[in-house]
């Protein structure tokens, strides 16, 4: 609340300017500030971390998987990736270059998954091999595309020297 106190010190004669002492009571403003701070603290939610669920195999027992079900995606430089189905020496689908756009790696994953499912009746397994010159964001984009396309069996593995040579031959 604002208070204005005025006192007349001059009894008569000339009219001088009246001196007013202004005093502002800030109690209500402080109360309002604390109410607002309390409101915003109570109603604010912190950003939830966005994490992708990752299932790891239990135990060390592993079965050999046929090369006809294995798609290998090698991540290279300049936001490019090379993929092939089967083994690099004798591929079922020849090594092809793609990017990380929706009509790139996503289309390749969908097409190859459909082909593998039609031929074998089983789901496809994807091996993601990040190269030395690849970017972390490309690995994340690849994992996102695997989640979008519904491919549940995949692994991130170390890249082999023959894969690095194939990337160099393709220029990525």
Image (cartoon, rainbow, N blue to C red):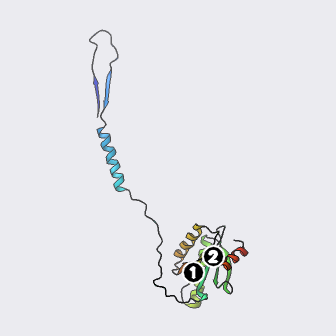
Q: Is residue 40 above or below residue 62?
A: above
Disc 1 secondary structure class: strand
Horizontally, residue 54 falls left or right of residue 165, namely left
Q: Disc 2 versus disc 1: distance between alpha carbons? A: 11 Å
Q: Quadrant of residue 127?
A: bottom right
Residue 6: x percent and y percent?
28, 22
Q: Is residue 164 above or below residue 117?
A: above
Horizontally, residue 146 falls left or right of residue 162, namely left
Q: Quadrant of residue 28?
A: top left
Residue 11: x percent and y percent?
26, 12
Q: Is residue 66 above or below residue 28?
A: below
| Viewer-nearest residue: 29 or 74 | 74
Quarter of the image for the C terminus: give it: bottom right
Residue 142: x percent and y percent?
57, 73
Give the number of marks: 2
**Residue linked to disc 1:** 126
Quarter of the image for the N terminus: give it: top left
Counting residues from the N terminus, which is met first, the one under dot 2 or under dot 1?
A: 2
Density class for disc 1 (Cα within 10 Å; few <14, some 14-19, many ≥20) is many
Density class for disc 2 (Cα within 10 Å; few <14, some 14-19, many ≥20) is many
**Residue linked to disc 2:** 74
Q: What residue do we see at 32% from left, 23% from top?
A: 20
Horizontally, residue 59 falls left or right of residue 130, namely left
| Viewer-nearest residue: 4 or 91 | 91
Q: Is residue 93 above or below residue 98?
A: below
Disc 2 secondary structure class: strand
């Amino acid at each position: 609340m604002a208070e204005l106190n005025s006192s007349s010190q001059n009894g008569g004669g000339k009219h001088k300017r009246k001196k007013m002492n202004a005093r502002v009571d800030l109690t209500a403003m402080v109360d309002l500030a604390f109410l607002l701070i309390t409101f915003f603290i109570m109603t604010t939610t912190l950003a939830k971390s966005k994490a992708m669920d990752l299932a790891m195999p239990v135990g060390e027992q592993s079965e050999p998987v046929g090369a006809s079900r294995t798609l290998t995606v090698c991540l290279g430089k300049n936001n490019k990736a090379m993929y092939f189905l089967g083994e690099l020496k004798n591929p079922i689908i020849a090594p092809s270059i793609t990017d990380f756009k929706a009509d790139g790696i996503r289309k390749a994953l969908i097409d190859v998954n459909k082909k593998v499912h039609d031929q074998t009746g089983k789901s496809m397994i994807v091996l993601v091999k990040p190269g030395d010159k690849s970017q972390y964001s490309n690995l994340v984009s690849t994992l996102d595309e695997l989640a979008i396309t519904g491919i549940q069996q995949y692994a991130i593995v170390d890249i082999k020297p023959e894969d690095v040579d194939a990337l160099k031959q393709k220029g990525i």
